[in-house]
Amino acid sequence: MKKLTTTILIAAMALSISACGNSSEKTSAGAAQSSASKSTETAESSGSKDSKNFTIGFSNCSQDTPFFANMTPIIEDYAKEKGLEVISLNADNDTSKQNKDIQDLISRGIDVLLINPVNEDGATAGIEACNKKNIPVITVDKNVTKGNTAWVGRDNKVMGKLVGEKLIELLGGEDAVGTILEIQGTAGSTTMMNRRDGFHEALEKAPGLKIVQSSYCDYDRSKAIPATQDMLQANKDVVAIFGHNDDMALGAAQVCQEQKLENVLVCGVDGLMESVLKIQDGKYHCTASNDPVLLGQTAVDAAIKVMAGETLDEFIDAGTVVIDKSNVDEYANKDLDFATMVK
Amino acid sequence: MKKLHISELLKRYNLILLLLIFIIISTILSPNFLTLDNFLNLLQQASIPGIVAIAMTLVVLLGGIDLSVGSVLAFSGMVSSMVALQFSDGVMGILLSCLAALAVGSIMGFITGTLISRYKLPDFIASLAMMEIARGAALLTTSGNPVFGLGDKFHQIGGGFLFDKLAYTAILWIILTVIFSLILKYTVFGRSLFAIGGNREAAMLSGIKTKRNYTLTFVLSGLLSGFAGILTASWMSTGQPTAGNGYELDAIAASVIGGASLSGGKGSILGTFGGVFLLQVITNIFNLIGLPSYYQRIAKGIIIILALLLNNFVASDKGKE
């Protein structure tokens, strides 16, 4: 009996490892529903195609990062302001759940679907179902391969590039020399690859700056800290550290502070408020905003336009801004989670 | 009794052998590996997973498993950082935040342990359920946002260094390793874990309070995970709801590399210490030479297999302490 249990256990462990164990990332149903339930009391399945008074369905990929977690209430609040109904569901990083969520949203009579897909292809079935019912699909943040009317997002490549250009400027121009540590996000994620490519493209202009890449740290600060420590052991002429997101770069900034490396410039992407406030203190140096408020509002505006019968551009850029000490005071606000361009 | 000692020694010797081989390889691969700085680095990096692994080893000794350690770490960390934030870095506030986190961890451990020992739920299922509940709760406290703005005093607990060199967390890890090694060796409770893990029926018949000790072990596991949660939040100066993700599997791996058997009754806290250290050396050397982390995962898997094969070479009967 014990042998059997052990065998099953080991099999389960092996499975969860090979499935890249995101199991502990799932929120419990209670957590997932809490924000959804607020706005779904009176979702009528009338499906009235009224351009002023319609129902938006929002399928979010997950709520376990600050960025995604903030997106749901932002969309709900802004749509309420505009007098619209929103039903939002959270897919917990699970593509099959996302498809079921979309089916549920359709049967609850939504008129337009906003979706932040788990990945590019995963939600195909759900999107096809929307297409059959003539429900317009607008992707938010991440895009899908086909079937959507428009994509409201940002070009992560541009963000990486802008940070790279700003960093060269902060290091004193294109003849700067030294090593830059690059703390990498999740292996194979499009966001990671785009931010990396944009950053590298900018750095090509400064041949004296050598980039050393870390192992993949999954956008997780607790993995970024040891990686930074190890890389600082191995590289002695580090002038800057670039993190694929602010959360990891903040970990790197902390290591620099501990090791009294005040001259190392630390930068990231996202405009996480913690890093913005650190720019004010001079312990962090630049970031490119990835403002969820503007993104969510742009998406709701796009939905309103579609329902009013307007044609949308395929890509609607929600915009970004580079924040460093020259303009940080415009964005620093302790009450927010991210720097916002919405005034 | 004597026989066990010899095989225990051999097992430890095994692990030391593996560690030595790795240290030699690493020294050849990178000139930065065998330095005092890097060694202190390693100790710091391994300390928090190390404390979680102590919790896991206690449960594994019983023949049980606790999948909730990483999530309990996250939820306790969130609780401690939320409380610390209320008190703007005062000593009282820090004490309160630690107490709150330890209470939360112990209560979660108590619930899991009771479900298993009183209500006969399988360990795997009960702790899996607690893993989900704790992770959900951690995300729920701030709807997925990290808690930041924790003061410098709070950061000192998990991020401070003795003489600017040796991390406090590393000292705590070593102290806890010693304490729990002594508990297992010299207390009735500690010795009963081997007995329960070796043969539950026999342990019950010989008058050991199996149910109570089983629950108590899970309380300890929750308490240690909660403690690791405080240290994590303090070390990163943020409460992160996603902290400790995947720690449960690393902790199981470290216990097993250290000579523990998943069917119970076998294992040692010192062996686990070595197991955690070995796993950290792998990560460290890959970072030092800059190899992609895909190889790291493959190497990790191979090391686990190697360690187990070595342990089987000196297979002994189950501990009959």
Image (cartoon, coloured by chain):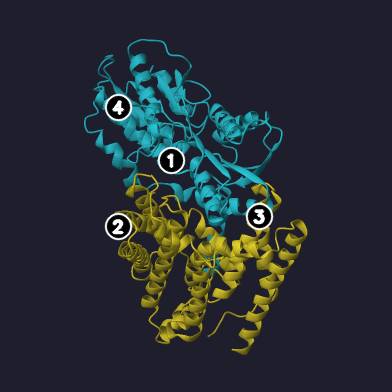
Q: In the rendered image, what is the letter of the chain coloured yellow?
A: B
Q: In which quarter of the image is residue B24?
A: bottom right
Answer with mark 1 or mark 4, whichever residue precedes in sequence: 4
Q: What element carries label 3?
A: helix
Q: Looking at the image, which residue is at 33% across and 54% down?
A: B85
- The answer to whether marks 3 and 4 mark residues whose Cβ atoms lie closer than 8 Å is no
- Outermost residue on the bottom side: it is B2
Q: Which amino acid does label 3 sit on?
A: Gln
Marks 1 and 4 on same chain: yes
- Which mark is drawn over residue B249? none
List the residue tagged with mark 2. Answer: B87
Callout 2 environment at 10 Å: few (<14), some (14 to 19), or many (20+)?
some
Q: What element carries label 1?
A: helix
List the residue tagged with mark 1. Answer: A280
- Does A96 sit above or below residue B120? above
List the residue tagged with mark 4. Answer: A78
